[in-house]
């Protein structure tokens, strides 16, 4: 009698157990497929990263070139305020130009400061 009960319990429990194990394995298979898809995209992502790095490098280079091109084109007075023409930009004191702030406009020179790098420049006319 005990053997019959054990067989009936086994018949009822084993399919449920196996069904759960199969679902778990199916879930793992789905995760594995997703991982393979991501791995397949790595070369595509690497290309995008290299392109972004190159663009960033180009932007830095252009920015550095601009810093070297700051030129004092003129100084004049407008409404009793000194005005400087710097790299073809009309600037008053406290205006920004090429990443610098105009801190002082004198009769023959202009003082600029980059508050990020703490770099200070004095522009003047060539003698």
Image (cartoon, grey):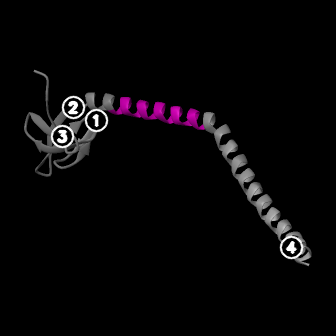
- CA separation, marks 4 and 2? 101 Å
- CA separation, marks 1 and 2? 7 Å
Q: Which circle marks residue 6 in the picture?
A: 4
- Direction from residue 12 to residue 77 in the image, left or right: left
Front position in the image: 27 or 58: 27
Disc 1 marks which residue?
88
Q: Residue at x 73, y 47 (%)?
A: 33
- CA separation, marks 4 and 1? 96 Å
Q: Residue at x 10, y 34 (%)?
A: 109
- Is disc 1 in contact with disc 2, using a CB cutoff of under 8 Å? yes
**Callout 3: helix, strand or loop?**
strand
Q: Earlier in the sequence, mark 1 or mark 2?
A: 2
Disc 2 marks which residue?
73
- Residue 84 location (% of width, % of height): 18, 40
Q: Residues within 10 Å of mark 3 (few under 14, many from 20)?
A: many
- CA separation, marks 3 and 4? 99 Å
Image quarter (top left, top right, bottom left or bottom right) of the C terminus: top left
Q: Which of marks 3 and 4 is nearer the N terminus?
A: 4
Which residue occupies the extreme front position in the image? 1
Q: Residues within 10 Å of mark 1 (few under 14, many from 20)?
A: few
Q: Which of marks 3 and 2 is nearer the N terminus?
A: 2
Chain part drawn in magenta: 45-63
Q: On screen, 111 above or below 1?
A: above
Q: Which circle marks residue 99 in the picture?
A: none
Disc 3 marks which residue?
84
Which of the 4 quarters of the picture holds residue 116? top left
């Amino acid at each position: 009698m005990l053997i019959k009960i054990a067989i009936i319990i086994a018949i009822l429990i084993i399919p449920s157990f196996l069904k759960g194990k199969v679902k778990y394995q199916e879930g793992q298979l789905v995760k594995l497929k997703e991982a393979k898809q991501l791995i397949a995209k790595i070369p595509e992502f690497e290309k995008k990263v290299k392109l972004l790095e190159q663009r960033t490098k180009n932007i830095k280079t252009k920015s550095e070139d601009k810093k070297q091109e700051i030129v004092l084109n003129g100084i004049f007075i407008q409404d009793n305020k000194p005005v400087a023409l710097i790299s073809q930009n009309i600037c008053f004191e406290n205006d920004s130009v090429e990443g610098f702030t105009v801190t002082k406009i004198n009769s023959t020179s202009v003082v600029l400061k980059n508050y990020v790098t703490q770099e200070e420049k004095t522009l003047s006319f060539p003698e």
